[in-house]
Image (cartoon, rainbow, N blue to C red):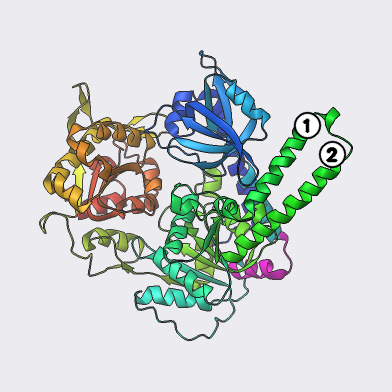
Amino acid sequence: MKHLSFEKQIQLLKLEYEHEKQEYEKATQIIGIGRKVKRGDCWYPISVGQGRYNSLDLFVVDITRTADFDIEHNFEYGRTVSFFTEDGSGQLHHLPFRAQVSYAEEDRMVVVLPNESTLAQLQGSGRLGVQLFFDETTYRLMFDALNKIMFAREGRMWELREIFHGSRPMAEPLKIPHIRLPWLNGHQEMAVNRVVACKDVAIVHGPPGTGKTTTLVEAVIEVLKREPQVIVCAQSNTAVDWISQRLTERDVSVLRIGNPSRVTDDMLACTYERRFESHPDYPTLWAIRRDMRQLYSTPRGRRGRDFHQKISRLRDRVDEIELRIRTTLFDQCRVIACTLAGAANPLLQGQHWHSLFIDEAAQAMEAACWIAIQKADRVILAGDHQQLPPTVKDPVAQREGLGTTLMEQIAANKPQCVTMLTMQYRMNEELMRFSSEWFYGGLLEAAPSVRHRSLIDELDSPLVWINTDERLAEGEGGEELDYRERFVGSNYGRINKAEAQLTLSTLQQYAARIGHRRIRDEHIDFGIISPYRAQVQYLRKIIHSSPELKDIRRAVTINTIDSFQGQERDVIIISLVRANDHGQIGFLSDLRRMNVAMTRARMKLIIIGNAQTLCRHKFYRELHARSTEA
């Protein structure tokens, strides 16, 4: 695999930056509020709570959405947002400041405001909305990282660059006694041993269901027997949350920099902010900060001659206590967990670790990885380059290789550092076989505990394709629908309402075969997946309103492929949407996404799609041939 020069990466990253910025500006100008809300990029209208200072002395306010509760949103920690009002004619008026999400729940989020005066602007603005704003911060961090690594001429960062991309050989691994971990399988145990012994880099390649996270957790625990602390990163907050949760379940002390995407008590307890305010010295610090704010609120004419001396003494005291609390929190934890961009958080300034773990490394741009690599002596990468790739929106940047990950390049340049996990514990063997042969050279093996399991009986085929050719369906109003896709905009993609109705009836029928009582008693769960957001939203609407599914609705999750990464369900139904006369399948030709969708199922996979359209592509033709057609 040819390495992109760092100059080339910077050039392509600039293209991506400009593309995304232009798309945001275009969307801001021409996309109405309703479409932004449906995309999950906007809440409108909202209510604004009371402002307060949080434990880190940042002025924050609660924002609650008051409509469209069923739409999954894209607000999360660290994202920049802007506020607007709408005058009734569709004209937006943007408030002249930006805010940052501190954390977000389903219908409520906390945002950091620039200062107290901005709260009055929010509270006096009438009917108010909030939307995601184009955020340059991560791009700036990636550009800085690429420039630093490109111009490095000595030091550990230069050595790692030459090992990863140049001709510099990897150092011989440490000679350590083999670590026996009988609760792991042979390849998992081998991966842990290689991680512990490597001096430069190790890669854990984990296909679906092979226990990649389990292996990574064991590797972290073994490394912590030899090192006082490690840093664990991932591209997304969700992935950081998952590895953090698994580590805390093993009684490893984790300090989460940033706030979790899923706001639970267990995850919040790991955050720097929550631990900061739980420190015994925090009440004293809070009182001093209050005194400082009171002094600043005193009119200038009444401040007195010693005002600046008082402020200076109080600020010195604040700095002293903050440093003591921060030092204590970092000294007490064994794992620092954050996103790749979060590794540049000021709290981590000047800190360095021997070992950096990057989970879901196959989803991260190389530039993002270097943000964190600057802080480490060696790197352990875990992921699967046959699943979701990094998101690259500019077609030229994508074509020229910006989406080629550091993990892929190291694996190609230094294959001896890769350990592939081959025993999978999720899928029925028949479900596993096609993915194994197409993506993994037939190397995967189903564990005995899952090999032949099924929900109903041995005659129930695990892999079914329901072909929509020449079918007709009845719409919500009784009208006749054909199984043709419709284009509903570049941000939503395609929709196929007839196929959605068929998906609903398929779910109802299969749930009835299993039995609703059994579904509840045995906690059987279902996943409905579609590549297109418009289809997902329509599926949610009709499935959530189905009286036949009312008592098992909580067992059904409906989402896009990207949102299902890392998850699994007993039954997966995939609505592929595409149905046209030209065999056009769009980004369904990115087979890695289809690999993710197919491999979420434990016991039953039902694919709903137009075989005439899809089977012009060899992948879908072979998949259709392997399936039982219904």
Instruction: Check if residue 281 falls in the magenta segment.
Output: no
The residue under the point 36% across, 77% down is 186
The residue under the point 48% across, 26% down is 44
**Residue 150, quarter of the rendered image:** bottom right
Give the secondary structure at mark 1. Answer: loop
Give the secondary structure at mark 2. Answer: helix
Q: Counting other residues with Cα less than 10 Å from the Cα at mark 2, is it few (<14), some (14-19), or many (20 or more)?
A: some
Between 608 and 351, the one nearer to me in the picture: 351
The residue under the point 55% across, 27% down is 28
Q: Counting other residues with Cα less than 10 Å from the Cα at mark 1, is it few (<14), some (14-19), or many (20 or more)?
A: few
Magenta extent: 151-164
Q: Which mark, by number, is residue 298?
A: 1
Give the left or right position of residue 5, taking residue 131 as reference. Answer: right
Residue position marked by numbered label 2 in the rendering: 307
Residue 490 screen position, x and y as percent: 44, 32
User: What is the CA distance from the residue labelled 1 to the residue labelled 2?
Assistant: 10 Å
